[in-house]
Image (cartoon, rainbow, N blue to C red):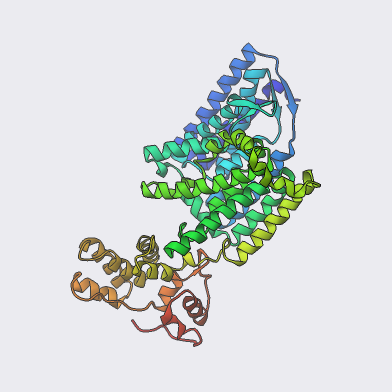
Amino acid sequence: MLPVRLLPLAFTAALAALSLLPVVRGNAALSATILSAAAALAVWHGLLAWRQPRVAASVVLRRQHYVQACAQGAILLYWGWYWREVYDAAHLLLAQLLFAYAFDMLLSWSRRDSFTVGFAPVPVIFSINLFLWFRPDWFYFQFLLIAVGFAAKELVRWNKDGRHVHIFNPSSFPLGLFSLGLILTGTTGLTWGQEIATTLNRAPQIYLVIFLVSLPVQMLFGVATMTLAAVVTTYVFGLLYFASAGTYYFVDAYIPIAVFLGMHLLFTDPSTAPRTELGRVLFGVAYGLSVIALYGALGALGHPRFYDKLLAVPVLNLLIQVIDRLSRTALRRIDPAAWWRGLAGTRRNAAWVGVWTAVFVALSAAQGVGDTHRGTHVMFWRQACAENLPNGCPHFGVLVSAFCNNGSGWACNEYGLLLQPELRPELAADAFRRACDLGSAAGCANLDGGGTGQAAREPPTLADYEVVVREGRRPLPAGLPPPEIYRRACAQGFADACGQASEPGDEPAR
């Protein structure tokens, strides 16, 4: 049987062994990172074995850890089926788990001459990887991020309800800290952060999947009120914004999918949340409002907006005792805990899960969450641009630029016109040239006109509709018959497609 003191070394050796994988050996920077991390852990282990040779170990299997890990793992597996980079990065996920186990054991050994073995590192690593990865060439930052998270959990503590416990969630604290560093240094490109935030939408019914896999967490640990408050706060704000502005605040959703994920499996750690029911409601409201404020501020400052769900959680963790004290003042009269005084424990949790389920069903029916949302339709944003509504022209430009790159001549021509040829003649000419190359007669006419005279427009062709018409946030399925494509285009605001929807229809001439 392996001696207890050698257990961290076993994880370290397994980490070093990953450098033998062909996918690791093919990247010199990644291979050096893994070997360097393993070497640092081995040296640390050697020093501890020399100075403190006696160490005790215990096995602690906490339900909170393995239930959360199962929920997070299910999302990683489902998401990875539709974005294969998740599966391709399995060796990097394993490297992080091995590093986390060894680091956590050695840190505990350093402070108490003992360590525990269980599932605690798994939900931390899964949570981090649902929101931020560093690219292989910069993977040493990923190990540093993990080390900061575990160090903060071990070293940054306070007294809470008579117990000496950690202040910060060990995944959200380093995510928030490193997000701030990436923003200040302008180095978001070192990560897959933007891709993670958007590719979650590739998985069909991902809102429903997140809702379902998080139910056991909410049932067992009583965090449904936090999720409920955060979701409702954000959705109500979105309705009010649309009523005043005519467009959507988060562009293509009332609640972006990565934010929805954060509302279920990032800020809902029961160990770093308020203890009172009203406190948890206020905590959820504060998280929803922080996402709204950060999304606007980051966009205004020209920074990537996907950090909106990450930056505020450590600050909110610091405020939980203040929130609990506030909830015990005159506000206790509106404490939701008073609604079900006869219920406690799992029964109360189940009641709140029932309320949250009813709200989720209602939001889904109202298209507040889910795959279907009018903000994904290019014609909605074309009209918003024509009416000069907030976000209208910028987001219409984002869409037609992407569709142009995907091979739509209609989109290239629209993008060229949006660029205002009289102001940006070279950029507009590039777009018109691409449109012309893709067979757009209007694009050719605008290119020959050189930005002078009346702008030429034309309706999309069947080939264009196959690119610009979406199924939710994803491209149309391959092989749809033309009448069905026209029908969907008509439903998404393409008036010229409506006359084609009921015909076997040949592609209209350019």
The answer to which image quadrant residue 189 occupies is top left
Q: Residue at x 64, y 23 (%)?
A: 108
Quadrant where the N terminus sits is top right
* In-image side of 189 versus 224 (left or right): left
Report if residue 198 is visible in the image.
yes
Q: Residue at x 22, y 61 (%)?
A: 424
Q: Residue at x 19, y 75 (%)?
A: 453
- The vertical placement of 243 against 496, above or below, is above
The answer to which image quadrant residue 370 occupies is bottom right
- Across and down, in percent, residue 402 comes to 39, 62
The answer to which image quadrant residue 268 occupies is top right
- Across and down, in percent, residue 271 comes to 66, 36
* In-image side of 315 versus 158 (left or right): left
Quadrant where the C terminus sits is bottom left
Q: Nearer the viewer, residue 12 or 507?
A: 507
Q: What residue occupies the far front of the structure in this picture? A: 330
- Across and down, in percent, residue 136 comes to 47, 41
Q: Residue at x 56, y 64 (%)?
A: 371
Q: What residue occupies the far right of the structure in this picture? A: 342
